[in-house]
Amino acid sequence: MPLIAWPPPKKAQPVTATRQIKLNEFYQLPDCGIKPIIAERNTTLGKLQAPSQRYLYDFRLYQALKDCLTRTSDEVQASLLPLLEQKQRDVQQNWLNLVNTSPEISVALWSRQAYFSAEEDHRFAIQSWKQLSQHSPESAESGKTVETRRLEDSLNNIANAKTPAKIKNDIRIFNQILPRLTDFIAIETAYLDCESHPGHKQKAQYLSNVFNLFFIQKIQPHVGKINAWYYQITPILAQLPLAESRGNWLAPEEHLTFLQQIKEHVTVWQNLFKRCEVAVRTS
């Protein structure tokens, strides 16, 4: 049987396209395990499949057709090969549909009221995104297991954690508020002349305690978590065939602005403490 290579992954808007098997074609199919799978599609549940279920169904049928071709005559192989090629295209298209239309992924990318809490650990969610990418046609064809329960669990974990949405929302909040706070601190501390006024140095020492209590102990660890999850999930999302409307979940410039705003905020504090010769506790 000739090998069929998977086409390069697409990043396009999903569409629905599949070949309908006529009744007379169905009865002419060989008895090698594919008829029961095809018949599932005509049930009520089969017609109401979610994107993930449609993808798993077509992949299972594709694998069954491949197996069938290894156990039939050359004549039957020739008749089944066009169906196999069509089903391969369906699998690829339904993978695009899964990634671009699944409500779980929409929730994970675009929830507007999702923010990180101090106690959250997203390692499990990151692993679920990795498991989702391992269900791609190319990964599955190379030997990775495609399982209904595993895929559905991954999608549910992704939706519950909302990791990309939380990264995006937290970064945008920082980018909106931090510049104003930085400017306020720079203006309010510009008059401090610690060399000429002992009372000014005392105020700078008080501000160093504020900086330690709020920035070092609370904001800095939070920023570290945002960056850690951002750097872990970005390459995973880049591997998925997300349409442009979904793939641009966070512009790279927004993350660079976030890093720059953090740096500028810290610099304002550092300049003050250096000018006033005040040591800052790191814990």
Image (cartoon, helix red, strand yellow):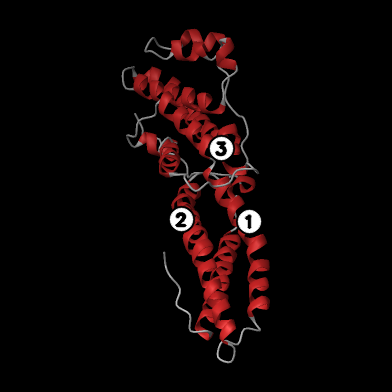
Q: Amino acid at mark 2?
A: Tyr
Q: CA distance from mark 2 to mark 3?
A: 19 Å
Question: Can you tell which quarter of the image residue 282 is in?
Answer: bottom left
The nearer-to-camera label among 1 and 3 is 1
| Picture layout, residue 173 above or below residue 64 | below
Q: Which mark is residue 220?
A: none
2 on left or right of 211 = left
Secondary element under disc 1, as helix, strand or loop, is helix
Q: Amino acid at mark 3?
A: Ile
Name the foreground residue: 197 vs 264.
197
How dense is the environment of label 2, judged by Cα within 10 Å: few (below 14), some, or many (20 and up)?
A: few
Query: In the rendered structure, are the residues bearing label 2 and label 3 in contact, judged by CB atoms less than 8 Å apart?
Result: no
- The residue identified by callout 2 is 231
Looking at the image, is mark 1 or mark 3 earlier in the sequence? 3
Looking at the image, is mark 2 or mark 3 earlier in the sequence? 3
Q: Residue 152 placed where, x, y %? A: 47, 27
Q: How many marks?
A: 3
- The residue identified by callout 1 is 172
Q: Which mark is residue 105?
A: 3
110 on left or right of 266 = right
Q: Amino acid at mark 1?
A: Arg
